[in-house]
Image: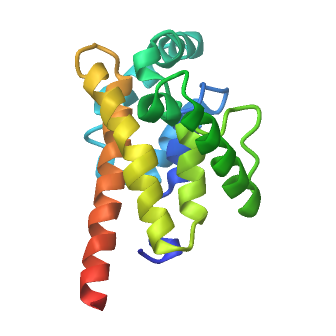
Amino acid sequence: MTELNTMPDYDILASLLEYPQENYKALLQSYQINLPDNKNILKPFIEYVNNHSFESIQELYTQTFDVNPICSLYSGIHIFGEENFNRGAYMARLKQAYQEHGLNCEPELPDFIPWLLRLSKRLKDEKKYTDLLNECILPPIDSILKTLNESPSPYKTLILSVKNMIEKELHTASEIKEVKI
């Protein structure tokens, strides 16, 4: 795993994936400054945010992620389905992990992808970190992206940015692991 101080800033990404609040445009600007690698990918999303009202951004978020269950930002739905006992056990383990790392995901459910991103940044164990990215975050992101690729939503570029950042981090982590061997 890369050193903690060089890890991607999943906190900014997590905040951008949450329901937009008053500071949303400032968060996007911070993302562009701190994570310039994805600026070109995000161009349609940046343009949308800069050219639309705050209410329009909130409405688009709701249409994209809340009304459309296929694009839900709750990873357990993508991994287990909506009504599955395993999803409950999964969320219980996640809630315990949040507590162990001093995080409180409430009022959200523990499998909310923005909170998984925040948790990943705090994991010090390389295997737990890569497992969380590979098994709990990347598959739902891929599923969401597949659906959004068929829509005009500018949020697809934000989801693509998340995917690219995670894949880059996993690639870097595997290169470091290979060097250690």
| Image coords of residue 160 (percent x, y) | 31, 37
**3 lies above or below 92:** below
- Taking the image as shown, residue 100 lies to the left or right of residue 162, namely right
**48 lies above or below 163:** above
* Quarter occupied by the C terminus: bottom left
Instruction: Locate residue 8: give its quadrant.
Output: bottom left
- Taking the image as drawn, is residue 7 in sight? no
According to the image, what is the colour scheme of the structure?
rainbow
Q: Of 108 and 32, which appears nearest the observer?
A: 108
| Image coords of residue 79 (percent x, y) | 43, 35
| Image coords of residue 102 (percent x, y) | 76, 59
Instruction: Locate residue 48: give its quadrant.
Output: top left
Tell me which residue sits at (66%, 27%) in the image. Answer: 21
Tell me which residue sits at (28%, 13%) in the image. Answer: 152
- Taking the image as drawn, is residue 158 in sight? yes
**142 lies above or below 5:** above
